[in-house]
Amino acid sequence: MSDLTAPATAGRRLSAALFRHPWLKLVLMLGPPLVWLLVVYLIALTLLLATSFWRLNVLTSQIEHVWGFTNYQTLIRDSVYRTIVVRTAGMAAAVTITDLILAVPIGYYMGRMASRRTRAILTLAVLLPLWSNYLVRMFSWKIVTAGGGPLESLLHVLGIDGSIAFSNWAVWLTFSYLWLPFAILPVFAAFERVPGSLMEASNDLGARGWVTFRRVVVPLVLPGLVAASIFTFSLTLGDYITPITVGNGYFIGNAIYNYVGTANNLPLAAAFALVPIVIMAVYLMLARRLGAFEAL
């Protein structure tokens, strides 16, 4: 009998200790994930930063632990790298704008107008593409945008000659499709949290629909729009499979992959890998200055 009551007694003691010491509960709950974040993310990022200051010996192909800014000078001075950065950032911005244009009306309808059953069906429809593998969805769009494919046939029917096969247009379409669910869900959640009483009060004060949307709704859903843009922008910045499979462009991810796998220039790859991090850091600071996070 004592063996059966021992675990229960220990459990009650632990529960009483957690009740008396709330900080202990917090440590036990947040400790493991914070340690994992520290070890896996922050230390890896620190090692990446340190590696970017080393250099590769072109004669021996060995990494020399000699500190310097050679890799960053190469990225700044060489116009090829600047072109790659501009191309990647431009594609990420185009995909982000496209997905936000599509996500706002869909998210508004789901969050403010659709019935509960319709909302559940639309949520399932948005999540359904995520159940299939990323490569399956990407290769599907490779078939759609290929020469002689469905999209080219549709363009011919519309009287438009030409093909977008293996072009940046194909990459833009593929990225916009791949990341659209990541834009719709935050926008939908943001519209769903908007209190209906505020919109009614705005209408009672004489504001028209567009004025209410611009001055009442948009400031409240701005954090959701920023969250959606962070997803689409960052995912596009770091992707390297779609550009070489669907298009023929050279993006930051492709350059990093080649430097690590082919050229074995790990220091230059580490320096180039910090470019998307810097771009996202600048974007987040601008978003914070514009007040995008005040409603969070």
Image: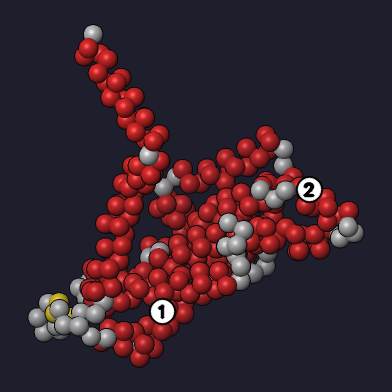
Q: Position of residue 30 (x, y in %)?
A: 37, 47
Q: Nearer the viewer, residue 122 or 242?
A: 122
In depth, the one of 197 and 182 nearer the eye is: 197
Residue type beneath disc 2: Ser
Most extreme residue toward the left is 60
Position of 81 with respect to 167 (left or right) is left
Residue sitting at x 76%, y 63%: 215
Which residue lies under the disc numbered 1?
84
Residue 249 screen position, x and y as percent: 42, 73
Q: Residues within 10 Å of mark 2 (few under 14, many from 20)?
A: few
Quadrant occupied by the C terminus: bottom right
Give me the C-alpha separation between circle 2 and circle 1.
Answer: 48 Å
Measuring 44% from the left and 56% from the top, which residue is drawn there? 138
Q: Residue at x 32, y 30 (%)?
A: 14
Query: In this picture, is 187 found above or below 74?
Result: above
Dot 2: what SS?
helix
Looking at the rendered image, the disc whose residue lies closer to the viewer, 2 or 1, is 2
Name the residue type under label 1.
Ile
Query: Can you see residue 144?
Result: no
Q: Residue 187 appears in which quarter of the rendering?
A: bottom right
Query: Sequence-wise, which precedes: disc 2 or disc 1?
Result: 1
Residue where numbered disc 2 is placed? 197
What's the residue at 83%, 52% (across, down)? 201
In screen coordinates, is 266 left or right of 105?
left
Tell how many labels. Answer: 2
Name the spot of residue 167 as percent of width and height, x first.
48, 71
- Give the residue furthest to the bottom: 77
Q: Split into 4 quadrants, where in the image is the N terminus?
A: top left
Q: Are marks 2 and 1 in contact (CB under 8 Å)?
A: no
- Expressed as whole percent of the image width and height from the top left, the position of residue 81 reads 37, 83
